[in-house]
Amino acid sequence: MTSLTDYLAVSAVLFMIGAAGVLFRRNAIIIFMCIELMLNSVNLTLIAFSQFLGDQTGQILVFFVMTVAAAEAAVGLAIVISLFRNKETVEIDQINLLKL
Amino acid sequence: MGIGEIIFWILSTGAVAFGLLCVTRKSAIMSAMMLVLTLICLSGLYLTLHAQFLAIVQIAVYAGAIMMLVLFVIMLLNLSPEDFKIGGNWKTVAGLLAAFGILAQLLAAIFMSHDKLPQTINQNASLLGTTESIGQTLYTSYSFPFEMASIILISAAVGAIILAKKRIV
């Protein structure tokens, strides 16, 4: 029988992979995908806790996280497109419009 | 080791391996395809937890709609592969160290609270994850947040169009 600890450990490893990706990649779209990976690892934690504790609230929360992730994907990619239109790049090192 | 445990380890190894590939691929398209495989493995893990509804929504919304949109943008921008080296400069090393710090902290917290956590899945778990029971809860106790979600989605759609448009008027 797999215990809750196993699920939490897998989710922690996935979160770490996503965080590492955000920190060392420079392509804005890949950073965006790493954020999706982190959101998904948290979803796994929520579902595991929900099913082991017998409380449905966790799964409802996951449903809303997915809704917000869909909205975030639309807005984030629109921002990437408008950045690319202005700067011809999606490398975050070269996007420093707000730097003094 | 039961069949459930074997399936769990196959799916979780798959999720972690494809996640690692997603982060380390040079071309954005390959990265996106690997992320789709990670999401499918995660959906299988939801099934091992008896969360059927969320497993299907994961495939339809994440692996289907969101990744579709990401792939569309990657193809639209026609990016060349990014050449990056882990450990190439001090920033990537610091990022990697920070990520391992996060992992160590999370794992320490998880394994130190091992005795306080429930050891077996709740006996009602298979009833909680069905579309019927989630729909029941969503339309009764959570009907107001559910309607708010529609407002978030419509404002995100309008915002995305305004942001991506060349001239608003």
Image: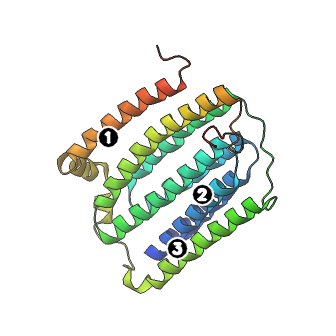
Residue lying at 58% horizontally and 45% vertically, measured from the top left: A32
Question: Label 2 sits on what residue type?
Answer: Gly
Query: Left or right of B67: which side holds B133?
Result: left
Give the number of the disc on residue A20. none
Can residue A87 be seen at all in this image of the molecule? yes
Residue lying at 54% horizontally and 25% vertically, measured from the top left: B164
Residue A45 x/y as whole percent: 44, 64
Question: Label 1 sits on what residue type?
Answer: Ala
User: Are marks 3 and 2 in one subunit?
Assistant: no
User: Are marks 1 and 3 in one subunit?
Assistant: yes
Instruction: Judge whether A49 appears above or below B147 on screen.
Output: below
Residue lying at 65% horizontally and 57% vertically, measured from the top left: A23
Label 2 residue SS = helix
Residue lying at 53% horizontally and 56% vertically, measured from the top left: A38
Give the number of the disc on residue B106. 3
Chain letter for mark 1: B
Q: Name the residue under label 1.
A: B149
Q: Nearer the viewer, residue B74 or A10?
A: B74
Chain letter for mark 2: A
Instruction: Judge whether A28 appears above or below A82 on screen.
Output: below
Q: Mark 2 points at which residue?
A: A18
